[in-house]
Structure formats: structure tokens, C-alpha cells
Image (cartoon, rainbow, N blue to C red):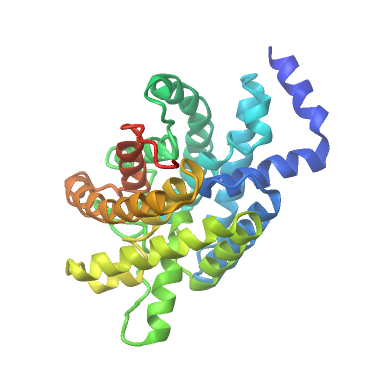
Amino acid sequence: MKGESIEKLSDYGVLGFIKINLRGVAQVMFQPSAWTGLLFLVGIFWGAYATDDAPIAWGALLGLVISTITAFILNLSTDDASQGLWGFNGVLVGCAFPAFFDSSIAMWLSLVLCAAFTTWLRVGLNRIMQSWRVNSFTFPFVLATWIGLLSAHAMQSLRPIHHSQIITHHSHHIQAGMDNFWELVQAWLNGISQVFLIESWVTGAFFLVGLAVCSRWAALWAAIGSALSMCIAALMNVPTSHIAEGLYSFSAVLTAIALATVFYQPSWRSAAWSILGIVVTVFVQAAMNAWMLPYSIATLTAPFCVTTWLFLLPNIKLNR
């Protein structure tokens, strides 16, 4: 079986393998485009180096490749691999571990293990969820990273960056505010860049352009998701620094893209449904932040997963 999977991998060639991985980056936001993935990857590297977090960029690349190669070694569906569906959870794991932990041999080994784990975890979760007509989305990344974060309490070789015991969220604690229009724009773009655990308005701009290359609707709804979630969080008196850092927007961005452009055709009904989904995502985000705090782990994209599952489970027909 291993021989067959390696042979299939070699059939793609170097360029084909690069395309598969670029699509994997793009699939974090549901886009099957290598060009979108390339722009996303450029945004990740820009943001990581601009915030002095270069390991995040290289971790993203490592997690992406490991999760994709794992699919071939396990002889999983090459159709899914061609669409980048084996790489998107791995790239997020690759961003998360360097964001939360000091760079060490233990951290990099854990990153490789958890990135590979997301590949077969996705298969199992999708099999369970198939009868519900939903899939696992980014939950394999969430679960694998939660395991890593919780294990850090017992494994001293995994050293959290910001605090020895508590990891509250994936912000790099850059002082951010919303005192003028430009800071509002930065906060809006941060909400998009934080999908990949990076706080950089330039990265957010790269992501928007990348989305527009593949789908103008996806770019529009990513923009709406970030803006509306900011408004709801501000209305509910969430700490301004958290809003400015994009911490209440990244899951809402994914919910907006999923509901408005992926699972439903664009229409006034799906638009209303998606707006409601964005609002609910902010509340789920706040609830999960409070729930997870005693366990010292971040919610990651779990609010997006939970909200989108809840909005898809009724199987409501909105396109008519």
C-alpha cells in the first residue's frame, strides 16, 4: 500500500505537488485555487516576518507538506489531495504551534505529529458526520492543537510563549486600538489575517486579494464577516484590544464565506442567513472563550465550526 501511494505522489511531479499544497493553503477559506494559495502563503510569510514570528511561516509550510504527504502514504483519496483538502488543517497546525510555543525540538516534532494526525482525523470525522450532511471543516486542526496545548501542562519541553500556564488566545499582543478610521481599517483586516493566527493588516489585504482572484463573492463576504463581527463585539462591550487584534472576527469570516458562498447560492435568503450566522459566531466565540479559559487553551476556529454546523444541520433550502 505504501508503494502504491508513493507512486501516485510521484505521478504528480514537482509542479503538481506544489499546486496541491498551494490549494491546501487556499482551502482554509474554501478556495480550490493555487493562485489564491500562493497569495495566502505570501501573506503568511509577510505577516510572520513583520511581527518577528518567522517560525509561524515555516511552521505553516512544514505542516502543509506533512499533512499532504501523509494522505499519500495512507493511500487516501487522491481526488481530495488534488483539491488541497489534505493540507488545510495541517497548515493551520503549522501556524498554531510556533504561535503558542517557543521554538524547540519538542515543538517542531509535536507540530509534525499533529499535522499528520489531522489528515486521518479528517477522514474519521467526515465519516461520522456524513449522515448529518456536514463535514469536519477545520475541526481536525482544532482538536489536534487542543491536544498540544493541553499536553503542555504536563510536558515541560513544550514551553508556552506568553505565559507558563495560561494561553488565552492567539494574539501576539501588539498594542492595537480603534481610535481613528485607519485603526478601524487595520482592525478589520486583522480579523481576516487572524484566520492563520497572524495579526497583520497587510496579511489581511493579501488574503482579500487572494480570495478575489478565485471568488469575488468570497472576498466580499470575508470583508462583511470581519466588519459585522467587529460591530457586534463592540456593541456587546468586548475589550477593544481584542476587537482590534481581530480575535472576534476570524471565525466569523470563515462562517460568512461558508454560508454565503459555499453551501448556499448567493441570494437575499442566503445573505440574511449568513448575516445571522456571523452574529451567532460572535456569541459562540465569547461563550467558548469563557468556557476554555479555565483549561488554558484557545478556541481557535471552533466557533466557526460549531456555528456553521448548527446552521447547516437543519438542511434548510435557501436557494429557491
Q: Position of residue 98 (x, y in %)?
A: 47, 53
- Viewer-side residue, 252 vs 58: 252
Residue 172 shows up from this direction:
no
Left/right placement of residue 156 relative to residue 32 reads left
Circle count: 0
Rendered position, 95 above or below 138: below
Rendered position, 312 above or below 189: above
Q: Position of residue 230 (x, y in %)?
A: 31, 68
Point out the image quarter for the C terminus. Answer: top left
Q: Residue at x 54, y 72 (%)?
A: 202
Q: Position of residue 311 (x, y in %)?
A: 32, 40
Outermost residue, bottom side: 180
Point out the image quarter for the N terminus. Answer: top right
Q: Residue at x 31, y 86 (%)?
A: 179
- Viewer-side residue, 244 vs 311: 311
Q: Position of residue 57 (x, y in %)?
A: 57, 56
Residue 217 shows up from this direction:
yes
Outermost residue, front side: 320
Left/right placement of residue 278 relative to residue 117 reads left
- Viewer-side residue, 155 vs 232: 232
Outermost residue, top side: 1
Q: Residue at x 58, y 35 (%)?
A: 85
